[in-house]
Image (cartoon, rainbow, N blue to C red):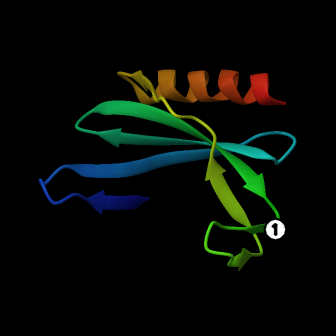
Amino acid sequence: MYKIIYKNGDMMEICKEIIAKNKKYKAVIFTIGGIYRVQLFEYLPECVDDDGDVWEELWQEVTTSNTITDTQQNAIKLAEEELNLLN
C-alpha cells in the first residue's frame, strides 16, 4: 500500500486499484481518516504532456469529483460500477 502524508498531518492511503476489463481505465480507492474515495484514471499508452515531454505510458485522471463512501466494500462496488460505465 502507498501512503502519503500531507503537510497538515493528514495521511492518504491507497487501498486498492481496479483495472477495467478493457484495460483502458482504472479506479483507485484511497482512504483519508476512515472515509473512502474513488478516483478514475484513463490509460494513455504514449502521450505528450503540456511541457512537450513524451511519456511511454501515463494514467491520467478522468474524474473531477470524488465518489465518497464509508466502507472499503462499498468503495469497491462503486468503483466497479463506474468502470463498467466507461467500458
Q: Amino acid at mark 1?
A: Glu
Give residue 18's position: percent from left, percent from top. Answer: 65, 43
* Residue farthest along the left direction in this orientation: 8
Report the front residue among 67 and 48.
Answer: 48
State which quarter of the image contains the C terminus.
top right
> Which residue: 34% across, 60% down?
3
State which quarter of the image contains the N terminus.
bottom left
Other-residue count near label 1 (Cα within 10 Å), few / some / many at <14 / 14–19 / ≥20: few
Report the front residue among 64 and 38.
Answer: 64
> Which residue: 63% across, 66% down?
50
Total label count? 1
Position above or below: 47 against 60 = below
Position of residue 35 in the picture relative to residue 56 (left or right): left
> Which residue: 69% across, 63% down?
58
> Which residue: 56% across, 29% down?
76
Position of residue 41 in the picture relative to residue 28 (left or right): right
Q: Which residue is mark 1?
A: 46
Position of residue 73 in the picture relative to residue 21 (left or right): left
Give residue 9's position: percent from left, percent from top. Answer: 13, 54
Give residue 48's position: percent from left, percent from top. Answer: 74, 69
Position above or below: 52 against 71 = below
* Residue farthest along the bottom direction in this orientation: 53
Query: Quick one: SS at disc 1?
Result: loop
* Residue farthest along the front direction in this orientation: 51
Give residue 51's position: percent from left, percent from top. Answer: 61, 74
Position above or below: 26 against 86 = below
